[in-house]
Image (cartoon, grey):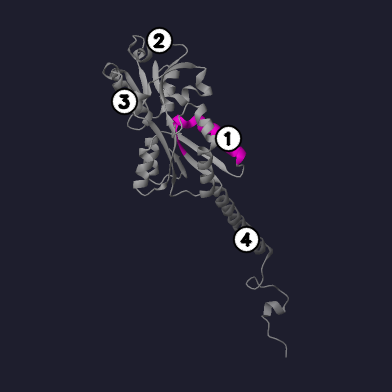
């Protein structure tokens, strides 16, 4: 006995509820392809993040770190370094709110220690990498004889504004303020101080003419972009607390292997050589 197929099929006609049209096939193919691509893209992004080190870098360390990152990429081409530059205090505030960084290179030891105490990092993941210095700096257009005047340059009648980094945000600003007090000139200059959010902005104030003289990091004064544009006088080391600069690997680090490699490079022979060229003292010296 013949099977009782639906009448429309027996008549040789298709039924749209039973048959898959070419349009439906194309739609399903597009959905499948896009879904597959999304999976592949996600995997590639995750893999790329494992090879990228996102670094919060104190502004005084910018030029030295740029050279260091370039040397690191040559030795470890499989890893990528993505730095952001700013004040240590601002970075601390961001990191306390889970900002997405793997490594923090501070201009002091205080902020990394605070992050450890708050559970954003482990004590064993902190490390001292450099000791900084401060200098008086003037642009070439200035007629001040820093070598002859030393700190007395701040009292010259031509100096209307003196730029330092904001002491509440930047350790180099704290050092500048301490040195001015120790050298006995703070009261005379305090009303002429202008504050940069970080040491790089402070340097910009002097370069642009917004200030006549600045107290900057030695590492900036000897860097290529600035050493031809001005001159400096080294502030005596015994007039301010040591600017010990500490780094820390964050608990939220997504790229542990790359981050550890960068830390080892920074504290290793090649990294230490770069630090010395930029006027930093090494921690054990």
Q: Which residue is mark 2?
A: 148
Q: Main secondary structure of the magenta part?
A: helix
Q: CA distance from mark 2 to mark 3?
A: 22 Å
Q: CA distance from mark 1 to mark 4?
A: 41 Å
Find residue 270 and report its horizontal and vertical position in percent: 56, 35
Q: Secondary structure at mark 4?
A: helix
Q: CA distance from mark 2 to mark 1?
A: 38 Å
In terms of sequence position, does the residue under pointer 1 or pointer 4 come before the other?
Answer: 4
Q: Earlier in the sequence, mark 2 or mark 1?
A: 1
Instruction: Work out whether residue 211 can be spotted.
Output: no
Toward the front, the furthest residue is 285
| Secondary element at tag 3 | helix
Determine if the magenta segment contains residue 62. Answer: yes
Q: CB under 8 Å between callouts 2 and 3?
A: no
Front-most of residues 10 and 67: 67
In depth, the one of 260 and 66 nearer the eye is 260
In the rendered image, the vertical position of residue 130 relative to residue 152, given as above or below: below
- Which residue is under mark 3? 178
Please state the extent of the stretch shown in magenta in the rendering: 56-75
Residue under pointer 4: 32
Cβ–Cβ under 8 Å for marks 2 and 1:
no
Residue at 53% in and 38% down: 268
User: Where residue 210 appears, x then y in whole percent?
Assistant: 40, 18
Q: Secondary structure at mark 1?
A: helix
The residues bearing labels 4 and 3 have C-alpha atoms spaced at a distance of: 66 Å
Kindly state the secondary structure of the residue where label 2 is placed: helix
- Crowdedness near tag 2: few (<14), some (14–19) or many (≥20) residues, C-alpha within 10 Å: few
**Is residue 220 positioned above or below 99 on the image?**
above
**Badge 2 or badge 3: first in the primary sequence:** 2
Residue 129 appears left or right of 166 = right
């Amino acid at each position: 006995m013949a099977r009782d197929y639906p009448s429309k099929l027996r008549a040789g006609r298709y039924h749209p509820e039973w048959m898959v049209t070419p349009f439906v096939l194309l739609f399903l193919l597009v959905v499948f392809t896009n879904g597959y691509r999304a999976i592949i893209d996600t995997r590639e992004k995750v893999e790329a993040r494992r090879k990228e080190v996102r670094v919060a870098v104190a502004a005084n360390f910018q030029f030295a770190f740029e050279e260091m990152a370039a040397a690191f990429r040559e030795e470890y081409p499989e890893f990528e370094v993505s730095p952001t530059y700013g004040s240590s205090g601002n970075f601390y505030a961001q990191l306390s709110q889970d900002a997405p960084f793997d490594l923090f290179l501070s201009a002091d030891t205080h902020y990394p220690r605070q992050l450890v105490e708050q559970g954003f990092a482990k004590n064993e993941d902190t490390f001292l990498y450099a000791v900084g210095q401060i200098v008086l700096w003037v642009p070439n257009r200035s007629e001040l004889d820093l070598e002859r005047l030393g700190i007395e340059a701040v009292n010259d009648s031509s100096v209307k504004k003196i730029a330092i980094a904001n002491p509440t945000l930047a350790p180099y600003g704290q050092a500048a303020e301490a040195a001015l007090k120790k050298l006995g000139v703070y009261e005379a200059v305090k009303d002429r101080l202008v504050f940069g959010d970080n040491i790089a902005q402070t340097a910009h104030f002097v370069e642009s003419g917004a200030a006549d003289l600045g107290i900057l990091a030695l590492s900036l004064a000897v860097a290529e972009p600035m050493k031809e544009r001005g001159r400096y006088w080294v502030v005596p080391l015994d007039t301010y607390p040591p600017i010990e600069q500490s780094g820390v690997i964050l608990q939220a680090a997504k790229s542990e292997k790359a981050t550890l490699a960068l830390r080892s490079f920074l504290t290793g022979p090649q990294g230490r050589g770069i630090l010395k060229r930029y006027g930093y003292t090494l921690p054990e010296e």
